[in-house]
Amino acid sequence: MDSNKYLDDISEIKNMMSRSSRFISLSGISGILAGCYALIGAALAYMRLKTFSSDNYSGFSGRTSNIWGNDLFNDLILIAVSVVALAVITGIILTIKKAKKSGEKMWDVSSKRLVLNFALPLLTGGLFCLVLLQYGVVGLVAPATLIFYGLACINASKYTMRDIRYMGIAFIILGLISTQFIGYGLYFWALGFGVCHIVYGALMHFKYDRNK
Amino acid sequence: MSIINNINKAFDHRIRLGIMSVLMVNDYADFKMLKELLGATDGNLASHTKALEKEEYILVEKQFIGRKPNTRYSATKLGKLQFKKHINALEKLIGK
């Protein structure tokens, strides 16, 4: 009995504990790319808003009645949906790649648990934002998305790298601050979904991915 | 002397260490999940879970999900306590 065997035992225990409870193949690069898409999306939305306000400025902030079926609104939704779709697809592809590399199964108990716990607050937030739109409280949509996304990250952090918790907290703080600057939602979105994602992705990449 | 006493023979195998590690951080795990995580064969895993069950370190529940039989394992209080002692003893032996 030498201490080498005990050392192996300890590392096996640690390995099993983390592998069975946390999904650790999330890719850092996908965070960076998601942030870039968000910034591009924000820039497109900004340009679209500018051309709109030069036509007829009624102000897209605060309360607006009848936003559904409005051209501007449709374009903004299209931009938002494309950004989210691109980010999710990139994330899935890069995560599959990383999982394959480290020999982890992509769709197992830990990843299912992660997705479920991330999706619950996020779906709640999504529905809540639809309700805000229903009542025409457009100005609070941006803060609400940031806050609920932050809560989703914090909830998911129990089932993946713990670091995602700090990004969640950053989103919540940003969301709360933005409630005091209604009408500047786009800037806060860019700061949160763009800059925060890029910073987080880069940190994760250097912390976990680079040396493997 | 006392350190050596805390090394538990019941955990002295890679598969058994693995089973206990998984059950320490998860409320329960089923047979398939353990098999995939540990990379063990059916027979191998079954004999090790049986040994741990006999020591009353883990609890085995057999149930049906739809029509498929499903075996669920969870760690008992005794099992968790003994495993913690075992880990502490290992750490002391290594000298941290």
Image (cartoon, coloured by chain):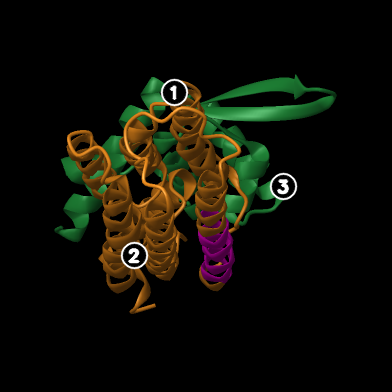
Front-lying residue, B33 or A78: A78
Q: Which residue is disc 1 drawn over?
A: B76
Mark 3 neighbour density, 10 Å: few (under 14) some (14–19) many (20 or more): few
Left or right of residue B72, residue B78 in this image = left
- Which residue: 17% across, 34% down? A180
Of mark 1 and mark 3, the one earlier in the sequence is: 3
**In the rendered structure, which segment of residues is drawn in magenta?**
A84-100
Mark 1 neighbour density, 10 Å: few (under 14) some (14–19) many (20 or more): some
In this view, the residue farthest toward the bottom is A211
Front-lying residue, A117 or A159: A117
For residue A93, which quarter of the picture?
bottom right
In this view, the residue farthest toward the right is B67
Mark 2 neighbour density, 10 Å: few (under 14) some (14–19) many (20 or more): many
- Separation of disc 2 and disc 3 at Cα? 40 Å
| Both labels 1 and 2 in a single chain | no
Residue B80 vs A158, above or below: the answer is above
Task: Assign the N terminus of chain B to one quadrant of the image.
Answer: top left
Of marks 2 and 3, the one in the foreground: 2
Q: Which residue is disc 2 drawn over?
A: A201
- Which residue: 67% across, 42% down? B32
Chain B representation colour: green
Task: Assign the C terminus of chain B to one quadrant of the image.
Answer: bottom left
Chain A representation colour: orange
Place of residue A109 in the rendered image (x, y in percent of width and height, measured from the top left): 57, 42
- Which residue: 26% across, 56% down? A191
Place of residue A34 in the rendered image (x, y in percent of width and height, measured from the top left): 43, 63
Left or right of residue A27, residue B67 in this image = right
- Which residue: 39% across, 68% down? A36
